[in-house]
Image (spheres, coloured by chain):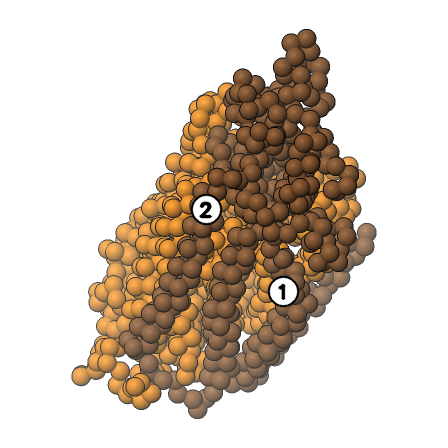
Amino acid sequence: MSDVNTTMEHTHAEAGHHAHEAHHENFFTKYLFTMDHKMIAKQFLITGIFWAIIGAFFSVVFRLQLGFPNADLSWLAPVMGRWLTPDGTLDPNFYNALITMHGTLLVFFVLTAGLSGTFANFLIPLQIGARDMASPLMNMLSYWFFFLASVIMFASLFIPDGPAQGGWTAYPPLSYLQGQGMTLWLLSLTFFVASTVLGGLNYITTILNMRTKGMSMFKMPLTIWALFFTAVIGLLSFPVLVAGFILLIFDRSLGTSFYLSDLVVNGQFLDKGTGSPILYEHLFWFLGHPEVYIVILPAMGIVSEVLSVNSKKPVFGYRAMVFSILAITILSFLVWAHHMFVSGMNPFVGSIFVLFTLLIAVPSAIKVFNWIATIWRGNIRLNPQTMYAIGFVSMFISGGLTGIFLGNSTIDIQLHDTYFIVAHFHIVMGVAAFLGMFAGVHHWFPKMFGRYMNRSMAYMHFWVTLIGAYLIFWPMHYMGMAGVPRRYYSFDAFDAFSQFAGMNTFISVVAMIVFAFQILWVANFFYSIFRGRKVKESNPWGATTLEWTTPINPGHGNWPGDIPEVYRWPYDYNKNGHEFIPQTVPMEEGELEHEETPAPEKVS
Amino acid sequence: MTALLIILVIVLVLVVLLQIALTSDFINFIKGDDDEEGRSKFQGTMLMVFLVFGFIALLWSVYYFKGRFLPEPASEHGHLIDMNFNLALLFTGIVFVVTQILLFYFAYKFRYRKDRKALYFPENNKLEVAWTIVPAIVLTFLIVKGLTSWYAITSDAPEDKIVFEATGKQFAWVLRYPGVDGELGALAGRDKVSPTNEVGIDWNDPSSKDDFLANDIVLPVGKPVEVQIEAMDVIHSFFLPHFRLKMDAVPGITTRFWFVPTITTAEMREKLGDPGFNFELACAELCGRGHSSMRKVVTIVTPEEYDKWVKAQTPYSQLVGAYEQKAPLQTADNSNTGTPLNAEIN
């Protein structure tokens, strides 16, 4: 591991007080209890990859059940153990556990912590020109709270009655009626939120206070804007989730009944008064919906950056991009109840949420058009990260458009809780966010580890993932339109649903192939850390942003000398005959900011 | 064993791919000149191939699954929902085709070439305004259409509606009909639930006397029907896919949905040429182990057949002996399923 950061100790004394720490590093302070934002980012990333493998493996197992109903899985017994019935089929309770853990792990532990945690930590100080986060200690705590949440969640896989089985939404009273797995699930996510809040506060503070000289807000790269608003959303919505969880913990442990009314469970009467699970649904979705923007905004930022750098063309409509992120941030808090159109909520309330939900399609559309305009008449190096970014835009279009169906309460009556919604959110926030993440990892891998990822492997992985994802999720729309409900262990009982058995088998086979290729990506990732081609030039992609002005393997404190000063916005590509002009290059005499382009030929 | 074998093969294939990738990158590295132009051309061409084959596959799949997407709607409001669906499909379809083509075509057309210069084109307010306003107008149209339908669907049911009650519990639906008087007896509270009073009916309410429990849902065609949805333990969801009807069953509150069936089961069987066809009721909210087994058959009959069926049912109160002092309530514990549908209707 020592060759990963060979130059770590070569930070100069003038790099400020952070540099001193670099001299007293041992294994624990350097790799474990580190306060260096770059190492914390790598910790988030590697923990995220760990969870992604487990979460994806769970999906393969329940796809086995769906594609090959009641197949003999006893060969999986060494891994699955008592999750199988004596005759080798998957136990329905554990099927529910698998879908619950798949959702929880991927939404929170991978696409929130793994994506936002990685790139916010890595890019914010590097791209705004800061030596570290505002509070490196809080940053370290943020990771270790996440780690604690991970340990608890992992432990819940091994307890006798299995992990939580109530879906990732954990609606009471179902979640109320469950065993220890649900207790651990709630505990774990409470710690997880602590991690997110600590991280989010830090990201916001750092961006607002610690930008280098000349780095005004509107000279920040779009990655930073995206991560900034992600942190704002997280900070405002995650505490509400915790409130919801704590009331649920009270209901489960202290005999309160915030969410419970008089119930009859298995013939047993439970005297619970007149609470309502709808309250929980509101609290949950007040986070639950902004959460999808927490997942997708960092990916959007990464994609904007990657497309611009690799097309060698300014991102189109920088300010429109910023304001559309702002609009998404605001609207994201006004749409949560579109998950509840058929929950028994007052239909008038529903109609308000239809309005805001469909409105949010406007800023999303602006972003898509701007990305397409960015690559138009560019000079696009179709590097793997560019391919991932194009895949992201394609997926975001496909998944975003189906949101217009689901956000319309009338249509949602039929599509709610069917495979249509499964297809929608997997495409728009699952696959798309993952493609954004792959783009980001590939793009900044040289900065993270001083080496390149293997390109051929990345191309192979990209193509299998893109084609596979469409083959898996596109047909699910058809099933959903026919009404096939999600979270079904088996469709055998229903004539209307079992007609898609062939399609389910097909989807399962493709899912397994795609899973295998994700393992290929992970292999590439770890192989390249240690054996990848070494980076020889400090700015391998020809980018303008500040992180490429650091040494190839920056130490703690990032810049050996003074922090560079910034003079221009981050997207001066192909301006005045220069392929790219770094932000640190002063404006020339009489040079105009991006508002007035020097040679606007095509514009009418 | 075969599964292990398959896994082994997959692992081997992956290892082979890994080796190929490593070698090809290594060769590039040895040769020293990274052919960025050729690489971009190959990947760009692949993007175009993907685009073309993607659209062909899309068209083929639409043709192949034609008629299975949205099954023939069997209720009045179902047509309204389908109309909204098709409207959304029209607009999103256009956007989908245009944007995907532009995205992949631009990536191919403007791929890296040594002699190409990218255009410095950072912004254009006219374009931004255009692609803000056009989606906004289209969405406003969809919102207005959607909400008009939404208010129509969620409006109060007509006075002459037929009411029945569906109570979700782990893992079955209990169906209660009002009997000849057309009025459901009140519920007395969940604490009154027992093997002889499955949903806790208030026997003091006179209209409860002729209520009956049914095995399956039977409804007349062309009459407004309101289903009152209850839940006993956890949240369930009352879902009739053919009728485009879904409403959660929430413990503690009564939810409602009214609709007008437009086609009888017999007519539907004839139309589809499938004598085994049945409308179905499913649960659409994860409710535990047996979530995927909460099925009931829905039979739509002519009003005459319906009246006949209602008259043939034995009231629940009579079955469990609610009004007969001499019969202790505990003895009649097996009679919670009502009487099956008449043979000639089924």
Residue, disc 1: A471
**Which residue is the extreme one toward the bottom?**
B115
Q: Colour of chain A?
A: orange
Q: Residues within 10 Å of mark 2 (few under 14, many from 20)?
A: some
Residue at 25 percent of width and 70 percent of height: A566
Q: Say if A286 sits above or below A444 in the image.
A: above
| Marked residue chain, label 2 | B
Residue at 60 percent of width and 58 percent of height: B70
Q: Position of residue A388 (x, y in %)?
A: 51, 69
Residue, disc 2: B154
Residue at 48 percent of width and 27 percent of height: A261
- Name the element at disc 1: helix
Q: Is residue A32 left or right of residue A318?
A: right
Q: Position of residue A237 (x, y in %)?
A: 37, 45
Q: Which mark is residue A510?
A: none
Residue at 49 percent of width and 84 percent of height: B109
Colour brown belongs to chain: B
Q: Say if A550 sits above or below A228 in the image.
A: below
The kind of residue on which mark 2 rests is: Thr
Q: Say if B79 sits above or below A90 in the image.
A: below
Q: Is residue A556 visible?
A: no
The kind of residue on which mark 1 rests is: Leu
Q: Residues within 10 Å of mark 1 (few under 14, many from 20)?
A: some
| Marked residue chain, label 1 | A
Q: CA distance from mark 2 to mark 1?
A: 36 Å
Instruction: Give the position of the C terminus of chain B as an image quadrant.
Output: top right
Same subunit, labels 2 and 1: the answer reads no
